[in-house]
Image (cartoon, rainbow, N blue to C red):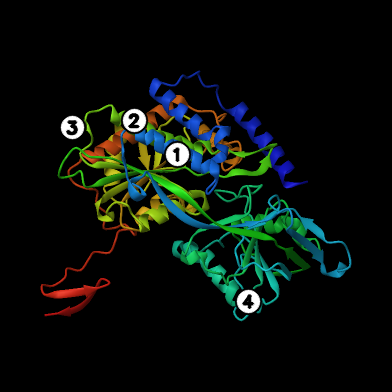
Amino acid sequence: MRPDKTLAVSLALFSTLIQTSLPAQSPQHPTPATAAWWAQTTALSGDSMEGRDTGTEAYERAAKYVAAQFSSAHLKAAGDNGTFFQTVPMHQVDLDTSQSTVTLTAASQAAAKPTPLHLLEEVTLAPRESLPADLTGALIFLGYGLPTPGQDLHNKIAVFFNNTPAGLSPADRDTFAPRRTKALAQAGALATLSIDNPAATEPTHWPAAYARTVTLTNSPTAAPSTAPIALRISAESAPKLFASTTQAFAPILEAGEHGTPLTPLDLNATLSLHLVTHSKDISSPNILAVLPGSDPTLAPEYVALSAHLDGYGYGTPVFGDKLYNGTLDDAAYVALLIEIAKNQNTLSQKDHPRRSLLFCIFTGEEKGLLGSAYFTTHPTVPVANIVADLNLDQLRPIFPLKILTMEGITDSTLGDTARTVAAKFNIELRPDLEPERNLFRRADNYNFVRIGVPIASFIFGYDRGSKEEIIYRDWYARRYHKPQDDLATPIDWNAAATFNQFYADLAITIANTSDRPSWSQSSSYAPAPKTPIPPGCTTTDGKLEKCH
Protein backbone atom coordinates (compact mmCIF):
# COMPACT_ATOMS: atom_id res chain seq x y z
CA MET A 1 0.00 0.00 0.00
CA ARG A 2 1.41 3.41 -0.97
CA PRO A 3 2.33 5.74 1.96
CA ASP A 4 -0.34 8.30 1.16
CA LYS A 5 -3.06 5.65 1.23
CA THR A 6 -1.76 4.23 4.51
CA LEU A 7 -1.81 7.73 5.94
CA ALA A 8 -5.36 8.26 4.76
CA VAL A 9 -6.54 5.06 6.45
CA SER A 10 -4.77 5.77 9.77
CA LEU A 11 -6.02 9.34 9.86
CA ALA A 12 -9.56 8.23 9.13
CA LEU A 13 -9.38 5.89 12.11
CA PHE A 14 -7.89 8.65 14.26
CA SER A 15 -10.63 11.07 13.24
CA THR A 16 -13.26 8.47 14.18
CA LEU A 17 -11.61 8.16 17.60
CA ILE A 18 -11.79 11.90 18.10
CA GLN A 19 -15.40 12.17 17.02
CA THR A 20 -16.45 9.38 19.38
CA SER A 21 -14.33 10.40 22.37
CA LEU A 22 -14.76 14.15 22.57
CA PRO A 23 -17.89 16.01 23.67
CA ALA A 24 -19.28 18.54 21.27
CA GLN A 25 -18.11 22.05 22.09
CA SER A 26 -20.61 24.84 22.58
CA PRO A 27 -20.67 27.37 19.76
CA GLN A 28 -18.24 30.25 20.19
CA HIS A 29 -17.98 33.63 18.58
CA PRO A 30 -14.82 35.74 18.32
CA THR A 31 -14.62 38.98 20.24
CA PRO A 32 -14.09 42.14 18.14
CA ALA A 33 -10.35 41.99 18.95
CA THR A 34 -10.13 38.33 17.99
CA ALA A 35 -12.12 38.95 14.80
CA ALA A 36 -9.65 41.69 13.85
CA TRP A 37 -6.77 39.29 14.49
CA TRP A 38 -8.41 36.64 12.31
CA ALA A 39 -9.02 39.17 9.54
CA GLN A 40 -5.27 39.85 9.46
CA THR A 41 -4.63 36.10 9.52
CA THR A 42 -7.00 35.68 6.56
CA ALA A 43 -5.22 38.40 4.61
CA LEU A 44 -1.84 36.73 5.19
CA SER A 45 -2.76 33.09 4.69
CA GLY A 46 -5.55 33.16 2.15
CA ASP A 47 -4.87 31.48 -1.19
CA SER A 48 -3.93 34.81 -2.77
CA MET A 49 -0.73 34.87 -0.66
CA GLU A 50 0.25 31.46 -2.11
CA GLY A 51 1.86 30.16 1.08
CA ARG A 52 4.57 32.87 1.32
CA ASP A 53 7.53 30.65 0.45
CA THR A 54 10.93 32.22 1.11
CA GLY A 55 12.38 34.05 -1.87
CA THR A 56 9.17 34.11 -3.92
CA GLU A 57 7.12 37.00 -5.27
CA ALA A 58 4.29 35.81 -3.02
CA TYR A 59 6.49 36.26 0.05
CA GLU A 60 7.47 39.76 -1.13
CA ARG A 61 3.78 40.59 -1.51
CA ALA A 62 3.10 39.43 2.04
CA ALA A 63 6.12 41.37 3.35
CA LYS A 64 4.85 44.56 1.72
CA TYR A 65 1.45 43.98 3.30
CA VAL A 66 3.01 43.65 6.77
CA ALA A 67 5.16 46.75 6.24
CA ALA A 68 2.11 48.73 5.16
CA GLN A 69 0.29 47.66 8.32
CA PHE A 70 3.21 48.76 10.49
CA SER A 71 3.39 52.04 8.61
CA SER A 72 -0.32 52.68 9.18
CA ALA A 73 0.30 52.02 12.89
CA HIS A 74 2.94 54.78 12.77
CA LEU A 75 5.78 52.49 13.81
CA LYS A 76 9.34 53.58 13.12
CA ALA A 77 11.08 51.66 10.33
CA ALA A 78 14.04 49.64 11.67
CA GLY A 79 15.32 47.88 8.56
CA ASP A 80 17.92 48.85 5.96
CA ASN A 81 18.33 52.46 4.84
CA GLY A 82 15.35 53.82 6.74
CA THR A 83 12.93 51.17 5.43
CA PHE A 84 10.97 48.42 7.15
CA PHE A 85 12.93 45.77 5.21
CA GLN A 86 16.21 44.03 5.94
CA THR A 87 17.33 42.13 2.85
CA VAL A 88 18.56 38.62 3.66
CA PRO A 89 20.83 37.14 0.92
CA MET A 90 20.42 33.39 0.42
CA HIS A 91 21.32 30.54 -1.89
CA GLN A 92 18.78 27.89 -2.90
CA VAL A 93 19.32 24.36 -4.21
CA ASP A 94 16.32 22.39 -5.50
CA LEU A 95 16.12 18.71 -6.35
CA ASP A 96 14.34 18.31 -9.67
CA THR A 97 12.06 15.41 -8.77
CA SER A 98 10.71 15.20 -12.32
CA GLN A 99 14.16 14.10 -13.56
CA SER A 100 15.73 12.55 -10.44
CA THR A 101 15.27 8.88 -9.56
CA VAL A 102 15.98 6.50 -6.69
CA THR A 103 15.93 2.78 -7.52
CA LEU A 104 16.45 -0.38 -5.49
CA THR A 105 17.96 -3.53 -7.03
CA ALA A 106 18.36 -6.94 -5.41
CA ALA A 107 21.96 -8.18 -5.69
CA SER A 108 20.80 -11.63 -6.82
CA GLN A 109 18.72 -10.09 -9.59
CA ALA A 110 21.10 -7.52 -11.03
CA ALA A 111 19.60 -7.96 -14.47
CA ALA A 112 16.05 -7.55 -13.20
CA LYS A 113 14.14 -4.31 -13.44
CA PRO A 114 14.95 -2.12 -10.42
CA THR A 115 12.21 -1.16 -7.97
CA PRO A 116 11.62 2.62 -8.04
CA LEU A 117 11.23 4.49 -4.78
CA HIS A 118 8.97 7.50 -5.17
CA LEU A 119 10.70 10.75 -4.31
CA LEU A 120 8.91 12.91 -1.73
CA GLU A 121 6.38 10.17 -1.01
CA GLU A 122 8.67 7.30 0.07
CA VAL A 123 12.18 8.71 0.14
CA THR A 124 13.69 12.18 0.18
CA LEU A 125 16.97 14.00 0.74
CA ALA A 126 18.36 17.46 1.39
CA PRO A 127 20.00 18.60 -1.87
CA ARG A 128 23.28 20.50 -1.93
CA GLU A 129 25.68 21.89 -4.51
CA SER A 130 28.15 19.00 -4.25
CA LEU A 131 25.70 16.20 -5.08
CA PRO A 132 26.99 13.78 -7.72
CA ALA A 133 24.75 13.24 -10.74
CA ASP A 134 24.82 9.46 -10.26
CA LEU A 135 25.60 7.26 -7.30
CA THR A 136 25.23 3.52 -6.60
CA GLY A 137 26.08 1.75 -3.36
CA ALA A 138 25.50 -1.55 -1.61
CA LEU A 139 23.05 -1.32 1.28
CA ILE A 140 24.15 -2.38 4.75
CA PHE A 141 21.91 -2.13 7.82
CA LEU A 142 23.76 -0.85 10.90
CA GLY A 143 21.02 -0.92 13.54
CA TYR A 144 21.03 2.60 15.00
CA GLY A 145 23.82 3.69 12.68
CA LEU A 146 27.10 3.53 14.60
CA PRO A 147 29.69 1.53 12.64
CA THR A 148 32.00 -0.83 14.51
CA PRO A 149 35.57 0.45 15.09
CA GLY A 150 37.57 0.18 11.88
CA GLN A 151 34.57 -0.80 9.74
CA ASP A 152 35.06 0.12 6.08
CA LEU A 153 31.92 1.60 4.49
CA HIS A 154 33.45 2.85 1.24
CA ASN A 155 31.05 2.34 -1.70
CA LYS A 156 28.34 1.41 0.78
CA ILE A 157 25.11 3.13 1.83
CA ALA A 158 24.57 2.88 5.57
CA VAL A 159 20.96 2.13 6.52
CA PHE A 160 19.85 2.73 10.10
CA PHE A 161 16.72 3.04 12.21
CA ASN A 162 16.37 6.68 13.24
CA ASN A 163 16.12 6.35 16.99
CA THR A 164 18.44 6.55 19.97
CA PRO A 165 19.41 3.27 21.65
CA ALA A 166 17.82 2.75 25.04
CA GLY A 167 19.92 3.12 28.16
CA LEU A 168 22.02 6.12 27.15
CA SER A 169 22.64 8.95 29.57
CA PRO A 170 20.89 12.24 28.77
CA ALA A 171 24.19 13.74 27.58
CA ASP A 172 24.97 10.76 25.32
CA ARG A 173 21.41 10.82 23.99
CA ASP A 174 21.73 14.52 23.09
CA THR A 175 25.00 13.96 21.20
CA PHE A 176 24.15 10.61 19.61
CA ALA A 177 23.00 11.91 16.20
CA PRO A 178 26.04 14.14 15.51
CA ARG A 179 28.40 11.37 16.73
CA ARG A 180 26.70 8.95 14.35
CA THR A 181 27.03 11.34 11.41
CA LYS A 182 30.72 11.89 12.15
CA ALA A 183 31.44 8.17 12.57
CA LEU A 184 29.71 7.27 9.29
CA ALA A 185 31.69 9.95 7.45
CA GLN A 186 34.97 8.72 8.95
CA ALA A 187 34.10 5.15 7.92
CA GLY A 188 33.74 6.36 4.33
CA ALA A 189 30.00 5.81 3.85
CA LEU A 190 28.90 6.83 0.39
CA ALA A 191 25.49 7.88 1.71
CA THR A 192 23.15 7.25 4.63
CA LEU A 193 19.53 6.13 4.55
CA SER A 194 17.59 6.59 7.78
CA ILE A 195 14.35 4.75 8.44
CA ASP A 196 11.66 6.89 10.08
CA ASN A 197 10.59 6.02 13.60
CA PRO A 198 6.77 6.20 13.54
CA ALA A 199 6.67 5.95 17.36
CA ALA A 200 8.72 9.10 17.84
CA THR A 201 7.16 11.87 19.91
CA GLU A 202 7.11 13.91 16.73
CA PRO A 203 6.97 11.50 13.73
CA THR A 204 8.27 12.74 10.40
CA HIS A 205 5.60 13.87 7.94
CA TRP A 206 4.96 12.43 4.49
CA PRO A 207 4.77 13.44 1.78
CA ALA A 208 7.61 15.94 1.90
CA ALA A 209 6.50 19.28 0.47
CA TYR A 210 9.61 19.42 -1.72
CA ALA A 211 13.36 18.73 -1.57
CA ARG A 212 14.96 22.14 -1.22
CA THR A 213 17.87 23.55 0.74
CA VAL A 214 18.28 27.26 1.45
CA THR A 215 21.33 28.72 3.18
CA LEU A 216 22.52 32.19 4.01
CA THR A 217 24.96 33.44 1.39
CA ASN A 218 28.58 33.09 2.57
CA SER A 219 27.55 31.24 5.72
CA PRO A 220 29.63 28.24 6.88
CA THR A 221 26.74 25.88 6.04
CA ALA A 222 26.78 27.18 2.45
CA ALA A 223 30.25 25.69 1.87
CA PRO A 224 30.54 22.38 -0.02
CA SER A 225 29.94 19.47 2.34
CA THR A 226 32.02 16.30 2.53
CA ALA A 227 29.46 14.51 4.73
CA PRO A 228 27.68 11.49 3.24
CA ILE A 229 24.52 12.24 1.30
CA ALA A 230 21.66 11.88 3.79
CA LEU A 231 18.45 10.22 2.61
CA ARG A 232 15.46 9.10 4.65
CA ILE A 233 12.72 6.60 3.92
CA SER A 234 9.28 6.17 5.43
CA ALA A 235 8.63 3.25 7.76
CA GLU A 236 5.85 2.12 5.40
CA SER A 237 8.33 1.71 2.53
CA ALA A 238 11.26 0.39 4.58
CA PRO A 239 10.28 -3.31 4.16
CA LYS A 240 11.37 -3.01 0.51
CA LEU A 241 14.96 -2.62 1.74
CA PHE A 242 14.83 -6.03 3.47
CA ALA A 243 13.14 -7.95 0.64
CA SER A 244 16.39 -9.72 -0.37
CA THR A 245 17.09 -10.99 3.14
CA THR A 246 15.49 -13.56 5.42
CA GLN A 247 14.91 -10.84 8.02
CA ALA A 248 11.36 -9.51 8.29
CA PHE A 249 11.08 -5.79 8.93
CA ALA A 250 8.31 -6.02 11.55
CA PRO A 251 10.62 -7.19 14.39
CA ILE A 252 13.12 -4.46 13.47
CA LEU A 253 10.36 -1.87 13.61
CA GLU A 254 9.19 -3.08 17.02
CA ALA A 255 12.70 -3.18 18.47
CA GLY A 256 13.66 0.12 16.89
CA GLU A 257 10.66 1.92 18.33
CA HIS A 258 11.78 0.88 21.82
CA GLY A 259 15.49 1.45 21.24
CA THR A 260 16.34 -2.18 22.01
CA PRO A 261 19.36 -3.80 20.29
CA LEU A 262 19.31 -4.26 16.52
CA THR A 263 21.58 -6.65 14.65
CA PRO A 264 23.60 -5.35 11.66
CA LEU A 265 22.70 -6.99 8.37
CA ASP A 266 23.85 -7.03 4.76
CA LEU A 267 20.71 -6.18 2.78
CA ASN A 268 21.90 -7.90 -0.43
CA ALA A 269 20.75 -4.96 -2.52
CA THR A 270 22.03 -1.78 -4.06
CA LEU A 271 20.51 1.67 -4.21
CA SER A 272 21.07 3.85 -7.27
CA LEU A 273 20.50 7.58 -7.37
CA HIS A 274 20.22 9.84 -10.40
CA LEU A 275 20.07 13.39 -9.11
CA VAL A 276 19.32 16.60 -10.99
CA THR A 277 19.52 19.84 -9.05
CA HIS A 278 19.00 23.50 -9.82
CA SER A 279 20.50 26.32 -7.80
CA LYS A 280 20.16 30.07 -7.68
CA ASP A 281 20.83 33.05 -5.46
CA ILE A 282 17.73 34.53 -3.86
CA SER A 283 16.92 37.17 -1.28
CA SER A 284 14.01 37.65 1.05
CA PRO A 285 13.38 40.42 3.59
CA ASN A 286 12.86 40.52 7.31
CA ILE A 287 10.36 43.22 8.31
CA LEU A 288 11.57 45.29 11.29
CA ALA A 289 9.74 48.09 13.10
CA VAL A 290 9.88 49.92 16.42
CA LEU A 291 7.26 51.39 18.70
CA PRO A 292 9.37 53.99 20.58
CA GLY A 293 9.26 53.77 24.35
CA SER A 294 7.91 56.57 26.54
CA ASP A 295 10.61 56.60 29.25
CA PRO A 296 13.72 58.61 28.22
CA THR A 297 15.91 56.29 30.32
CA LEU A 298 14.44 52.96 29.16
CA ALA A 299 13.36 53.86 25.60
CA PRO A 300 16.82 52.98 24.13
CA GLU A 301 16.18 49.38 25.27
CA TYR A 302 14.01 46.96 23.28
CA VAL A 303 11.66 44.08 23.96
CA ALA A 304 11.76 42.04 20.75
CA LEU A 305 8.44 40.53 19.62
CA SER A 306 9.08 37.98 16.89
CA ALA A 307 7.23 35.68 14.49
CA HIS A 308 8.03 34.26 11.06
CA LEU A 309 6.21 35.18 7.88
CA ASP A 310 7.45 32.44 5.55
CA GLY A 311 5.62 29.21 4.84
CA TYR A 312 6.11 26.45 2.26
CA GLY A 313 4.20 27.80 -0.72
CA TYR A 314 3.32 25.18 -3.33
CA GLY A 315 4.42 21.60 -2.73
CA THR A 316 3.51 17.95 -3.03
CA PRO A 317 -0.30 17.61 -3.00
CA VAL A 318 -1.99 16.10 0.06
CA PHE A 319 -5.53 14.88 -0.63
CA GLY A 320 -5.50 16.97 -3.83
CA ASP A 321 -4.38 20.26 -2.24
CA LYS A 322 -0.89 21.50 -3.15
CA LEU A 323 -0.97 24.96 -1.49
CA TYR A 324 0.62 25.02 1.96
CA ASN A 325 -1.11 28.11 3.38
CA GLY A 326 0.63 28.14 6.78
CA THR A 327 -2.26 29.69 8.70
CA LEU A 328 -1.25 28.81 12.27
CA ASP A 329 2.39 28.33 11.25
CA ASP A 330 2.91 31.24 11.39
CA ALA A 331 0.62 33.77 9.67
CA ALA A 332 -1.70 33.99 12.67
CA TYR A 333 1.10 35.25 14.89
CA VAL A 334 2.44 37.78 12.44
CA ALA A 335 -1.19 38.93 12.48
CA LEU A 336 -1.09 39.16 16.28
CA LEU A 337 1.98 41.41 16.16
CA ILE A 338 0.23 43.64 13.62
CA GLU A 339 -2.77 43.94 15.93
CA ILE A 340 -0.60 44.73 18.95
CA ALA A 341 1.09 47.48 16.94
CA LYS A 342 -2.24 48.91 15.86
CA ASN A 343 -3.65 48.79 19.40
CA GLN A 344 -0.63 50.62 20.80
CA ASN A 345 -1.05 53.25 18.11
CA THR A 346 -4.40 54.22 19.65
CA LEU A 347 -2.52 55.42 22.74
CA SER A 348 -0.71 58.72 23.10
CA GLN A 349 3.09 58.64 23.18
CA LYS A 350 3.17 59.17 26.94
CA ASP A 351 1.04 56.04 27.39
CA HIS A 352 3.32 53.82 25.32
CA PRO A 353 5.37 51.19 27.18
CA ARG A 354 8.47 52.58 28.88
CA ARG A 355 10.84 50.45 26.77
CA SER A 356 10.60 50.33 23.00
CA LEU A 357 8.93 47.35 21.32
CA LEU A 358 10.96 45.88 18.45
CA PHE A 359 8.70 44.03 15.99
CA CYS A 360 10.71 41.32 14.18
CA ILE A 361 8.98 39.50 11.32
CA PHE A 362 11.46 36.94 10.04
CA THR A 363 11.93 35.20 6.72
CA GLY A 364 13.39 31.73 6.11
CA GLU A 365 12.40 30.17 9.45
CA GLU A 366 11.17 27.01 7.76
CA LYS A 367 14.50 26.77 5.91
CA GLY A 368 16.57 26.76 9.10
CA LEU A 369 15.88 29.94 11.15
CA LEU A 370 17.67 31.96 8.48
CA GLY A 371 16.05 35.38 8.87
CA SER A 372 16.60 35.49 12.61
CA ALA A 373 20.16 34.21 12.19
CA TYR A 374 20.86 37.04 9.78
CA PHE A 375 19.26 39.69 11.98
CA THR A 376 21.08 38.61 15.14
CA THR A 377 24.43 38.71 13.31
CA HIS A 378 23.54 41.90 11.38
CA PRO A 379 21.42 43.73 13.97
CA THR A 380 19.79 47.02 13.07
CA VAL A 381 19.64 48.05 16.74
CA PRO A 382 22.36 47.58 19.38
CA VAL A 383 22.32 43.95 20.54
CA ALA A 384 23.21 45.00 24.08
CA ASN A 385 19.96 46.99 24.19
CA ILE A 386 17.67 44.02 23.39
CA VAL A 387 16.49 42.90 26.83
CA ALA A 388 14.26 39.96 25.80
CA ASP A 389 12.69 38.13 22.88
CA LEU A 390 9.11 36.85 23.08
CA ASN A 391 8.74 34.53 20.12
CA LEU A 392 5.45 33.44 18.56
CA ASP A 393 5.49 30.04 16.86
CA GLN A 394 4.22 26.49 17.45
CA LEU A 395 0.92 27.85 18.85
CA ARG A 396 -2.37 26.06 18.28
CA PRO A 397 -5.52 27.68 19.80
CA ILE A 398 -7.59 24.59 19.05
CA PHE A 399 -8.75 23.62 22.55
CA PRO A 400 -9.46 25.46 25.82
CA LEU A 401 -6.43 27.29 27.20
CA LYS A 402 -5.61 26.04 30.68
CA ILE A 403 -1.92 25.18 30.35
CA LEU A 404 0.97 26.80 28.49
CA THR A 405 4.34 25.17 28.04
CA MET A 406 7.01 27.86 28.21
CA GLU A 407 10.39 27.34 26.58
CA GLY A 408 13.05 29.09 28.67
CA ILE A 409 10.89 29.09 31.81
CA THR A 410 13.82 28.36 34.16
CA ASP A 411 16.54 30.08 32.17
CA SER A 412 15.84 33.66 33.17
CA THR A 413 13.61 35.90 35.27
CA LEU A 414 11.18 35.93 32.34
CA GLY A 415 9.76 32.69 33.78
CA ASP A 416 8.66 34.40 37.00
CA THR A 417 7.28 37.39 35.11
CA ALA A 418 5.31 35.15 32.75
CA ARG A 419 3.89 33.14 35.66
CA THR A 420 2.66 36.31 37.34
CA VAL A 421 0.93 37.49 34.16
CA ALA A 422 -0.46 34.02 33.39
CA ALA A 423 -2.05 33.77 36.84
CA LYS A 424 -4.36 36.68 35.96
CA PHE A 425 -5.78 34.51 33.16
CA ASN A 426 -5.91 31.29 35.22
CA ILE A 427 -3.23 29.80 32.97
CA GLU A 428 -0.80 27.28 34.42
CA LEU A 429 2.73 27.68 33.04
CA ARG A 430 4.81 24.51 32.77
CA PRO A 431 8.29 23.60 31.59
CA ASP A 432 8.60 21.53 28.41
CA LEU A 433 7.63 17.94 29.25
CA GLU A 434 8.84 16.68 25.85
CA PRO A 435 12.42 18.02 25.62
CA GLU A 436 13.27 15.34 23.07
CA ARG A 437 11.35 17.38 20.48
CA ASN A 438 14.01 20.09 20.87
CA LEU A 439 11.47 22.88 20.38
CA PHE A 440 13.67 25.39 22.22
CA ARG A 441 16.26 25.28 19.41
CA ARG A 442 13.82 24.86 16.54
CA ALA A 443 12.36 28.35 16.59
CA ASP A 444 13.68 31.86 15.95
CA ASN A 445 14.07 32.52 19.67
CA TYR A 446 17.17 30.31 19.67
CA ASN A 447 19.16 32.81 17.61
CA PHE A 448 18.47 35.45 20.26
CA VAL A 449 19.79 33.06 22.91
CA ARG A 450 22.98 32.72 20.89
CA ILE A 451 23.63 36.46 21.27
CA GLY A 452 22.84 36.44 24.99
CA VAL A 453 19.22 37.62 24.97
CA PRO A 454 16.77 35.89 27.37
CA ILE A 455 13.73 34.42 25.60
CA ALA A 456 10.22 33.12 26.12
CA SER A 457 8.11 31.11 23.72
CA PHE A 458 4.91 29.17 24.32
CA ILE A 459 3.03 26.03 23.25
CA PHE A 460 -0.55 25.19 24.18
CA GLY A 461 -0.17 22.48 26.83
CA TYR A 462 -2.21 19.51 28.00
CA ASP A 463 -2.22 16.63 30.45
CA ARG A 464 -1.18 13.24 29.12
CA GLY A 465 -4.18 11.19 28.02
CA SER A 466 -6.52 14.17 28.01
CA LYS A 467 -8.92 15.11 25.24
CA GLU A 468 -6.72 18.15 24.61
CA GLU A 469 -3.80 15.86 23.82
CA ILE A 470 -5.96 13.93 21.35
CA ILE A 471 -6.92 17.18 19.60
CA TYR A 472 -3.28 18.31 19.52
CA ARG A 473 -1.95 15.02 18.13
CA ASP A 474 -4.70 14.95 15.52
CA TRP A 475 -3.87 18.50 14.38
CA TYR A 476 -0.21 17.62 14.20
CA ALA A 477 -0.87 14.46 12.18
CA ARG A 478 -3.35 15.99 9.74
CA ARG A 479 -2.39 19.66 9.40
CA TYR A 480 1.14 20.53 10.62
CA HIS A 481 3.34 21.48 7.64
CA LYS A 482 0.59 20.33 5.32
CA PRO A 483 -1.85 22.16 3.02
CA GLN A 484 -4.49 21.50 5.66
CA ASP A 485 -2.95 24.17 7.93
CA ASP A 486 -5.32 26.65 6.36
CA LEU A 487 -8.22 28.91 7.24
CA ALA A 488 -10.50 25.89 7.71
CA THR A 489 -8.58 24.96 10.88
CA PRO A 490 -11.10 24.76 13.77
CA ILE A 491 -10.29 27.57 16.22
CA ASP A 492 -11.22 27.76 19.89
CA TRP A 493 -12.02 31.48 19.87
CA ASN A 494 -11.98 31.80 23.65
CA ALA A 495 -8.53 30.23 23.82
CA ALA A 496 -7.25 32.46 21.04
CA ALA A 497 -8.58 35.59 22.73
CA THR A 498 -7.06 34.62 26.06
CA PHE A 499 -3.64 33.81 24.65
CA ASN A 500 -3.49 36.95 22.52
CA GLN A 501 -4.27 39.13 25.53
CA PHE A 502 -1.83 37.21 27.76
CA TYR A 503 0.99 37.71 25.24
CA ALA A 504 0.26 41.43 24.81
CA ASP A 505 0.11 41.93 28.59
CA LEU A 506 3.38 40.04 29.06
CA ALA A 507 5.14 42.18 26.46
CA ILE A 508 3.91 45.41 28.08
CA THR A 509 4.80 44.17 31.57
CA ILE A 510 8.39 43.44 30.54
CA ALA A 511 8.63 46.75 28.73
CA ASN A 512 7.42 48.64 31.83
CA THR A 513 9.50 46.86 34.48
CA SER A 514 12.49 48.91 35.60
CA ASP A 515 14.87 45.94 35.93
CA ARG A 516 15.75 44.24 32.67
CA PRO A 517 15.34 40.43 32.57
CA SER A 518 18.40 38.50 33.76
CA TRP A 519 19.72 35.01 33.13
CA SER A 520 19.56 32.35 35.80
CA GLN A 521 22.97 31.22 36.97
CA SER A 522 21.86 27.61 36.52
CA SER A 523 20.90 28.04 32.86
CA SER A 524 23.10 26.23 30.36
CA TYR A 525 22.33 29.03 27.92
CA ALA A 526 23.46 31.89 30.15
CA PRO A 527 26.36 33.85 28.64
CA ALA A 528 29.69 33.34 30.36
CA PRO A 529 30.43 36.16 32.81
CA LYS A 530 32.80 38.75 31.45
CA THR A 531 36.15 39.12 33.22
CA PRO A 532 36.71 42.72 34.34
CA ILE A 533 39.52 44.45 32.49
CA PRO A 534 42.16 45.65 34.94
CA PRO A 535 42.99 49.38 34.83
CA GLY A 536 45.58 50.23 32.21
CA CYS A 537 45.02 47.03 30.20
CA THR A 538 43.79 46.55 26.64
CA THR A 539 42.10 43.61 24.94
CA THR A 540 42.01 42.15 21.43
CA ASP A 541 39.06 39.94 20.45
CA GLY A 542 38.11 39.71 24.12
CA LYS A 543 41.58 38.51 25.22
CA LEU A 544 43.84 40.45 27.55
CA GLU A 545 46.54 41.89 25.32
CA LYS A 546 48.84 44.04 27.44
CA CYS A 547 48.87 46.14 30.59
CA HIS A 548 50.78 49.30 31.33
Sequence-wise, the earlier of marks 1 and 3 is 1
- Which structural element holds mark 1? helix
Q: Name which residue type carries label 1.
A: Lys
- What is the x, y in percent for residue 474? 58, 37
Q: Residue beneath label 3, please? A: 350
Q: Distance between the residues labelled 1 and 2?
A: 16 Å
Q: Distance between the residues labelled 1 and 3?
A: 29 Å
Q: How far apart are marks 1 and 4 (CA)?
A: 48 Å
Q: Name which residue type carries label 4.
A: Gly
Q: Name which residue type carries label 2.
A: Lys
Query: Relative to the observer, which residue lies in front, 64 or 34?
Result: 64
Seen in the picture, residue 20 relative to 396 is either above or below; the reply is above
Sequence-wise, the earlier of marks 1 and 4 is 1
Q: Residue 64 carries which label?
A: 1
Q: Residue beneath label 2, please? A: 342
Q: Distance between the residues labelled 2 and 3?
A: 16 Å
